[in-house]
Image (cartoon, rainbow, N blue to C red):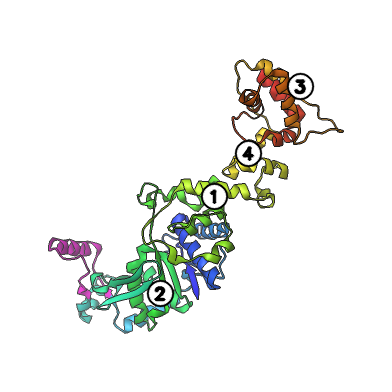
Amino acid sequence: MKLRFAPSPTGLLHVGNARQAVANALHARRHGAGFLLRIDDTDAGRSREEYAAGIEHDLAWLGLRWDEKVRQSDRLDRYAEAAETLKRSGRLYPCFESEDELRVKREMRLRQNRPPVYDRAMLRLTSEQRAQAEANGKVPYWRFRLSDGHAAWDDLVLGRMQVKLPSISDPVLIRADGTVLYTLASVVDDLELGITHVLRGEDHVTNTGVQLDIVAALGGRPDRFTFAHLPLLLDEAGGKLSKRFDGLSLRALRHDGIEPTALVAYLARLGTSEDPHPLSFDELAQTYDVRRVSKSAARFDMRQLLALNRRTTHTMPYAAVRDRLPDGATEPFWNAVRGNVDMLSELRHWWDVVGGGIVPPVQEGESGFLLQALEMLPEDRPDRPWSDQTWSEWTRALREASGRTGKSLFMPLRLALTGEEKGPELRELLPLMGHERVAGRLRLAAS
């Protein structure tokens, strides 16, 4: 068994791409199969090296590993040889119509209530007519003549599928400028590189029917391939997610603070009846089954992802985040604040609270209580340093002296020391902040 993920380096990877990459990688890991990364860069006009590098960076960030990597731009000779094979058999034929001529043909067929399928007029072209067209400066593009009948397969997600080939226009496989299109290049790669399972988006269903026909025309066995087509993703409102892909690129999610383990766990369960949980890649792979994916479109819910990201963050050990903490941040700091952050990007604020400078909000009528708290603040001595017991000892003494309890006791102190109404336990923050900083904020808040 061997699978592949085949992105085109024409833009940023988004969650739709990532879902397919995760599905292929998990399926491969569970079954001990090979996993190939194929960069589909035959479109020289749109492919960019920075996008190719970005793809690899994004996949590595997700924790996905591939056994081998190929670039289609390095295999152009293989596609040329396959094209010659199809030309010799008569399955690949030259065409000379312009875009305007094709548009007129489509419009005419629609007016006649006929499907806008290519009429194969160029199959009737004589050698003399072709020579005349080329003498007039026209350069042909090349279409693949589809078989009559249908292509069928048992899809791991969608069930029994069938594509009626006569209802499809003969696809262009080679442009007039010589560019080999995905439809041919992908078939040649899958045949020659030993791919057995193809997991991709539902928008490729028609492509699959066409490509199975090309496989047979090249002498391959269509039944060697197993397909799984994942339904497309919708947004929370049920609209097309494609309109929001810019905000849902992996680069944007990474910048916003989404954890890769949370995103992989979410995408692995998306469209299934299973709730996502914070699990490692290996744990997910143990039970991953693409056949559990629903035939219906799945909704990508950012609120669910954020909730899972929060749960993931709260369970991460210090060793996993050490290199991403603010300079100087320690393990006690991480243990104190991790239960109060949804994303690691929020840590800077709490590091400022612990070790930086913040301006406490004005609290009307609380100056006397805050000065009393300052007066009763325990000393931080070498023989009796502050600990996680200091907060309870201090507030117990304050309660007895002031008569305050509950919110009236704790809220003025929390606001004065952190500037926030909610947050990490102050019994853990107090030793990290230190006597000088705590005293200074009490004075400032009381002024």
Residue 400 in the image: state x and y as whole percent: 72, 21
Which of the numbered marks, if any, corresponds to residue 348?
4
Looking at marks 4 and 2 on the same chain, the residue that comes earlier in the sequence is marked by 2
**Mark number for residue 376?**
3
Secondary structure category for the residue under label 1 = helix
Residue farthest left in this picture: 112
Could one spot residue 178 in this view of the protein? no
Query: Neighbour class for label 3 at 10 Å: few (<14), some, many (≥20)?
Result: some
Q: Nearer the viewer, residue 47 or 328?
A: 328
Q: Amino acid at mark 2?
A: Val
Q: CA distance from mark 2 to mark 3?
A: 78 Å
Quick check: 270 left or right of 408? left
**Vertical position of residue 62 compared to residue 318: above or below:** below
Q: CA distance from mark 3 to mark 1?
A: 45 Å
Is residue 112 located in the magenta-colored stretch of the structure? yes
Tell me, yes or no, whether the highlighted magenta stretch contains residue 229.
Answer: no
Task: Look at the picture and state if 170 lies above or below 84.
Answer: above
